[in-house]
Image (cartoon, coloured by chain):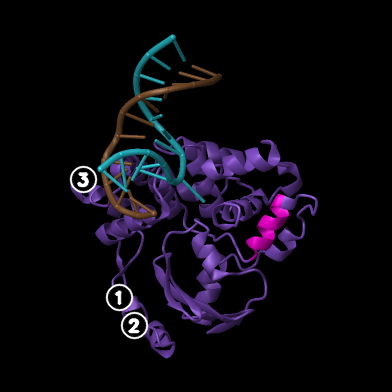
Chain colours: A purple, B cyan, C brown
DNA sequence: AGGCAGGTTCTTA
DNA sequence: TAAGAACCTGCC
């Protein structure tokens, strides 16, 4: 199906923004991605400005992908609140126009960002992919999705061997060496413990949706192997709390060099997380990186 | 070839 | 409460 989409949305920027690890570029012109999320696959491109071309039906878009892509949030409106005197943020937002904050699954985010610690992006992606192959259920695309690939002159084998992100139970039944073979290293006990907590009911992520931002952060930080940075990422990307502002080494440098370590959080509430994404992307991908 | 990567825990004062 | 070491592994 095709869909008008006139608010900010740049697939490449989102894929490179570091919030998601299972977007795979499968074509260059037009840029096309394969997204695996929520036990489903989606093929998506933007053949011209303002038009999305999606492999799913209208109904599936409405019931799942629309929320995943955060379709209802007005990013242009959020950008317009940026202080024009703040030249760094202003430039970052001009550069990063097109970024949206996906609404991802909390459990997948939790494990993904636990894995992310002290890893670079390619290593994170590879590790998550191995985990999905080892423990996740296979996803069989609908024939209409394979047809979409063929109609777009894309190799239909991009629809083969797709695996959903594993559930807590699926991770827990893995042998120890099977989990080790996913290159998770010293994080294996963190992952296993998180899965145990979910399974025995000690942690109920669905329940966390009802918590305030502060309470959510502190509950997530109680998990073994989850510190403030990972908990902030899970809150922002997995619980779609757009005010969270994860601070990693990149953001630490940005804050120090451009804000004397004082960012106007009050001004940008409740969208500090969106500002963080612009600055993070600009710091990493922009000219002055 | 070997340092380093989107951190967190553990140990030590 | 704070600073420093240790931690798996693969990428550049």
Which mark sits nearer the N-terminus, 3 or 1? 1
Q: Position of residue A286 (x, y in %)?
A: 59, 57
* Dot 1: chain letter: A
Residue A256 shown left or right of residue A231 in the figure: right
Q: Is residue B5 positioned above or below A126 on the image? A: above
Label 1 secondary element: loop
Question: Can you see residue A206?
Answer: yes
Report how far apart the C-alphas of labels 1 and 2 lie in the structure: 8 Å
* Dot 2: chain letter: A
- Neighbor class of circle 1 (other Cα within 10 Å; few <14, some 14-19, many 20+) is few
Q: Residue at x 69, y 62 (%)?
A: A94
Task: Identify the residue position indicated by label 3 in the image.
Answer: A176
Q: Residue at x 36, y 85 (%)?
A: A143
Task: Count numbered badges in the picture.
Answer: 3
Task: Identify the residue position indicated by label 1 in the image.
Answer: A160
Q: Position of residue A102 (x, y in %)?
A: 54, 61
Q: Residue at x 37, y 81 (%)?
A: A142
Q: Position of residue A279 (x, y in %)?
A: 62, 52
Which mark sits nearer the N-terminus, 2 or 3? 2
Label 2 secondary element: helix
- Neighbor class of circle 3 (other Cα within 10 Å; few <14, some 14-19, many 20+) is few
- Answer whether labels 1 and 2 touch (C-beta < 8 Å): yes
Q: Is residue A166 positioned above or below C1 on the image? A: below
Q: Position of residue A65 (x, y in %)?
A: 52, 70
Q: Which segment did they paint magenta?
A: A88-97
The part of the image, by quadrant, that contains residue A13 is bottom right
Magenta segment includes A122:
no
Report how far apart the C-alphas of labels 3 and 1 lie in the structure: 27 Å
- For marks 2 and 3, give the one nearer the viewer: 2
Q: Residue A156 got which mark?
A: 2
Q: Residue at x 46, y 81 (%)?
A: A55
A192, A126: nearer the viewer: A126
């Amino acid at each position: 199906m095709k869909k008008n989409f006139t608010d900010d949305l740049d697939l490449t920027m989102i894929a490179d923004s570091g919030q998601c690890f299972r977007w795979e570029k499968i074509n260059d012109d037009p840029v096309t991605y394969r997204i695996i999320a929520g036990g489903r696959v989606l093929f998506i491109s933007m053949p011209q400005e303002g038009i999305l071309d999606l492999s799913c039906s209208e109904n599936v878009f409405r019931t799942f992908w629309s929320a995943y892509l955060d379709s209802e949030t007005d990013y242009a409106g959020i950008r317009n609140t940026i202080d024009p005197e703040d030249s760094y943020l202003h430039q970052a937002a001009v550069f990063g126009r097109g970024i949206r904050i996906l609404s991802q699954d909390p459990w997948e985010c939790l494990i993904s960002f636990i894995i992310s610690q002290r890893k670079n992006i390619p290593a994170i992606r590879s590790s998550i992919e191995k985990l999905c192959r080892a423990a996740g259920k296979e996803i069989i695309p609908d024939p209409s999705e394979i047809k979409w690939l063929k109609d777009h002159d894309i190799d239909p084998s991009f629809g083969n061997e797709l695996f959903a992100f594993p559930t807590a139970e699926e991770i827990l039944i893995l042998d120890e060496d099977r989990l080790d073979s996913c290159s998770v290293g010293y994080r294996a006990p963190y992952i296993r413990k998180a899965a145990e907590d979910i399974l025995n009911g000690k942690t109920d992520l669905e329940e966390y949706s009802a918590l305030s931002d502060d309470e959510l952060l502190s509950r997530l930080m109680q998990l073994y192997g989850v510190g403030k940075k990972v908990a902030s990422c899970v809150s922002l990307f997995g619980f779609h709390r757009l005010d969270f502002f994860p601070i990693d080494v990149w953001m630490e440098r940005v804050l120090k060099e451009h804000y004397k370590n004082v960012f106007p959080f009050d001004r940008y509430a409740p969208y500090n997380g969106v500002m963080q994404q612009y600055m993070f992307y600009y710091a990493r991908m922009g000219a002055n990186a």
